[in-house]
Amino acid sequence: MRRRFVVEAVMIATYGQLLVPSRPVDFVLPYSTILELYDMKDGKEPVMDDPEEDAHVKQKIAELISFFEDALNRKKIERALQMPWRASSPLLLNDMIQFTVVHAVDNASYGEYFDPIETELLLTSLKLSVPLLSDQFEFQDRLLEAEVPVQVYDIEDYEFAVEQGITAADFESSRDL
């Protein structure tokens, strides 16, 4: 059974361990996070503090952009963009990794606590009943403070989430508590 996680596209490029899971994984990406990749690749602002790491991550961002711009993948993404909250067909990276792109729409329901990208991430998690994967402690704290009923894993717990993580049915029942 494939584990699913809502995640920002840049995390895929930043954290190489995400691409070598012990079980098959489906990364659910709000489309706006893919658009952020272009800004990060071309921007003057460093993604990482260390210049060598920054160059490496920017190269990985360029590779990820290339993957999404592949003709078949682009077509699947364009179909998803025709309607709010539509998900693309799976974009297969390899036997273990696939991506699902969602045309998430920020409805500002959590606007006072979260920025538009964070709102799309949490709404996607809620709407699809898929746990969130994040490396931002402040975001995780605000999720708890706002009592948003989403399951969130820290990036450091990724392997645990893949191995022992909850299933969609577990997630649904935990939301009812």
Image (spheres, rainbow, N blue to C red):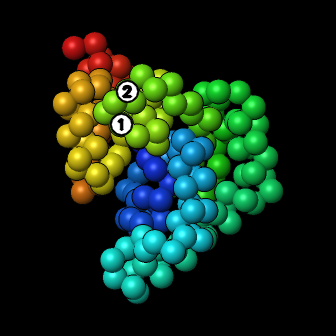
The answer to whether 96 appears left or right of 75 in the picture is left
Helix, strand or loop for disc 2: loop
Q: Which mark is residue 93?
A: none
- Residue at 44% from the left image edge and 47% from the top image edge: 7
Q: Are marks 2 and 1 in contact (CB under 8 Å)?
A: yes
Foreground residue among 105 and 62: 105
- What's under tag 2, amino acid-wise? Tyr
- What's under tag 1, amino acid-wise? Phe
Q: Position of residue 150 (x, y in %)?
A: 32, 29
Q: Which mark is residue 110?
A: 2
- For label 1, the crowd category at 10 Å Cα-Cα, with few meaning under 14, some 14 to 19 and many 20 or more, is some
Q: Position of residue 69 (x, y in %)?
A: 73, 59
Q: Position of residue 162 (x, y in %)?
A: 34, 47
- Residue at 37% from the left image edge and 27% from the top image edge: 110
The answer to whether 42 appears left or right of 1 in the picture is right
Q: Quadrant of the N terminus?
A: top left
Q: Which mark is residue 114?
A: 1
Q: In the rendered image of this protein, does residue 118 appear above or below residue 63?
A: above
- Per the model, the C-alpha gap separating discs 2 and 1 is 6 Å
Q: Position of residue 107 (x, y in %)?
A: 51, 25
Helix, strand or loop for disc 1: loop
State which quadrant residue 61 falls in: bottom right
Residue 49 visible in this rendered orientation of the protein? yes
The answer to whether 80 appears left or right of 137 in the picture is right
The answer to whether 80 appears left or right of 106 in the picture is right
Q: Residue furthest bottom?
A: 52
- For label 2, the crowd category at 10 Å Cα-Cα, with few meaning under 14, some 14 to 19 and many 20 or more, is some
State which quadrant residue 15 falls in: bottom left
Residue 167 visible in this rendered orientation of the protein? no
Q: In the rendered image of this protein, does residue 177 appear above or below residue 94?
A: above
